[in-house]
Amino acid sequence: MAKIHVTTTINGEPEEFLCAPGESMLHVLRNQLNLTGAKEGCATGDCGACSIMLDGTLVCACLMLGAEAEGREIETIEGMADGDHLHPLQEKFLEMAALQCGICTPGFLVAAKALLEENPDPTETEVRYWLAGNLCRCTGYDKIVRAVMDTAAELREAAQ
């Protein structure tokens, strides 16, 4: 079967790749583009470990075909930090030990960033609801939720 040529933007940079018609975006990211932050946890869209942003919408890369990236803008966990300067969410996750094995962490961070961009002042219930599509088998969710809430408060304070 012929491969499809895709031109897209990933983390603000133009990118081109070839993919099979049925190849997932997760497979393309990890195996062709060496962007291994998004993890394969379930391959069914149930765990959120492969969360990416597609044109500003949170999606599971395991449920998206690589060919669907044509002409689109993708943001991955690799684009969250600014060089060596971590995003405030990344810093807070480290500070509050809101991670353990790391499989779910990239997906939680991408989802939390999407939440705070849409709602800079979420309630705890809103944070829990927003992150419900991300599963963690190690830490539980309290440290993750507190890290997101604390980051939101710090970002609001810094904006004043």
Image (spheres, helix red, strand yellow):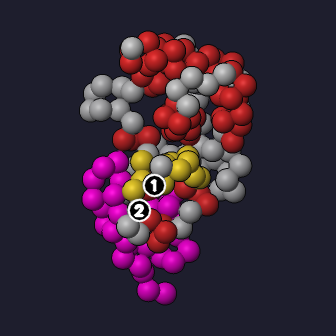
Q: Position of residue 35 (x, y in %)?
A: 40, 49
Q: Position of residue 155 (x, y in %)?
A: 44, 19
Q: Is residue 5 magenta?
A: yes
The answer to which image quadrant residue 141 occupies is: top right
Give me the residue at 49% from left, 69% from top. 68
The answer to which image quadrant residue 103 occupies is: top right
Dot 1 and dot 2 residues touching (CB under 8 Å): yes
Number of numbered discs visible in the structure rendering:
2
Give me the residue at 49% from left, 87% from top. 1
Give residue 72's mark. Answer: 2
Report the span colored magenta.
Answer: 1-28
Give me the residue at 27% from left, 53% from top. 13
Secondary structure beneath dot 1 equals: loop
Secondary structure beneath dot 2 equals: loop
Q: Quadrant of the C terminus?
A: top left
Q: Residues within 10 Å of mark 2 (few under 14, many from 20)?
A: some
Q: Is residue 15 magenta?
A: yes
> From this viewpoint, is residue 144 visible?
no
Q: Position of residue 32 (x, y in %)?
A: 39, 61
Give residue 55's mark. Answer: 1
Q: Tell me the kind of residue under disc 2.
A: Arg
Q: Residues within 10 Å of mark 1 (few under 14, many from 20)?
A: some
Which one is in front, 99 or 57?
57
Tell me if residue 79 comes above or below residue 59 in the rendering: above
> From this viewpoint, is residue 13 visible?
yes
Q: Earlier in the sequence, mark 1 or mark 2?
A: 1
Judge left or right: residue 10 versus residue 122: left
Q: Position of residue 31 (x, y in %)?
A: 43, 59
Give me the residue at 47% from left, 71% from top. 67
Q: Tell me the kind of residue under disc 1.
A: Asp
